Amino acid sequence: MGNGQSERNGRRKIILIDDEWHNIDDLEVAVDGVLNQMKLHRHREYAAHGGEAVDKLKESMLKGDGYAAIICDNHMKGEFDDGIHGDDLLRILTGNPLWCFSQDKADLDVDLSRFDSFREMQRYAVGHINEENEILDFLESNFESVVEYRMLVDYHFGHVRPVVAMLCGQPDGVQREGLDSVAVFQKPQMWGKNGQRLLCERQVLYHLVDNGVFPIDAVNTALGYHPRLSDDAHPTRALYRKPVKPKNNARKK
């Protein structure tokens, strides 16, 4: 097992990000089941939108711990819209905000230390400042400064290096620039031609096994007990809970 996997074994917290909890409730139950098998309780966190996810990553950085995996839904412009979809959130978290402004490959992996403000980033990427831009609004609403933002990126993706996965209804339609390290999984649940369910939850869990986050025995046991993901289970109505309302993200001038 490499150093990256050993590091993840010491940081087994998992965060799931989706504004529609009922779309990931099966995955949430499955992850909890695996963590219970590993006797790691309260190691799964949930964020209802990008701003809440940033808050949790900040808190984790201040505590000196981290996440073994970040699993994010792509479509997150729902009832509690904070402006960005999951793919741009992951680009921001992994240090590629400039591409979010310009969608130009030349703006990937740019040294962020050259910028003193998020508006300088936008001007660099597109040649002007647009205060109504959703990426600029998200950055200025959720980070006190570029320095704080860079610290978060450097800590989580330069030091901790979690496995990152994204759930998407149409993976072929996702622009993959700036997401080279992100595994993308087809989200809808369906029945195959031979009656076998094709569920992304299983694929995500086995992806975490392949990357040293979960042991295979714990995953197989948790799936066997899962009310909807076990081989013998039939689909039942999904559980629902009221989404978490995001904080008031007034833009910081």
Image (tube, rainbow, N blue to C red):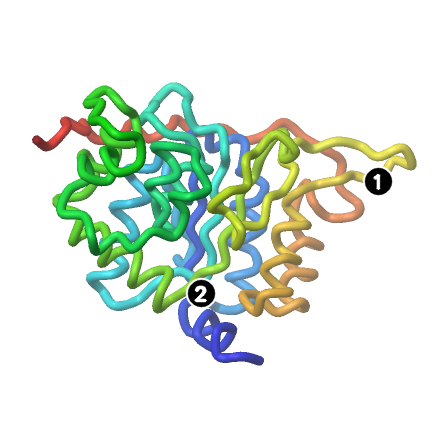
Q: Residues within 10 Å of mark 2 (few under 14, many from 20)?
A: many
Circle 2 sits on which residue? 12
Residue shown at 57% from the left, 44% from the top: 27
For the N terminus, which image quadrant? bottom right
Residue shown at 17% from the left, 52% from the top: 148
Q: Amino acid at mark 1?
A: Gln
Q: Give the answer, above or below, for where 96 lies relative to 152.
A: above
Residue shown at 44% from the left, 55% from the top: 14
For the C terminus, which image quadrant? top left
Instruction: Pick the residue in front: 27 or 156.
Output: 156
Q: Position of residue 36 (x, y in %)?
A: 52, 62
Does residue 237 appear to the left or right of 98 in the view shown? right
Element assignment for label 1: loop
Q: Position of residue 146 (x, y in %)?
A: 17, 48
Element assignment for label 2: loop
Circle 1 sits on which residue? 196
Instruction: Pick the residue in front: 107 or 72.
Output: 107
Q: CA distance from mark 2 to mark 1?
A: 31 Å
Q: Position of residue 212 (x, y in %)?
A: 57, 69
Q: Residues within 10 Å of mark 1 (few under 14, many from 20)?
A: few
Residue shown at 29% from the left, 63% from the top: 155
Asked if marks 2 and 1 touch (Cβ < 8 Å), the reply is: no
Q: Give the answer, above or below, for where 221 lies relative to 239.
A: below
Q: Give the answer, above or below, for where 153 lies relative to 117.
A: below
> For residue 151, what is the image quadrant?
bottom left
Does residue 34 appear to the left or right of 253 in the view shown? right
Instruction: Pick the residue in front: 62 or 103.
Output: 103
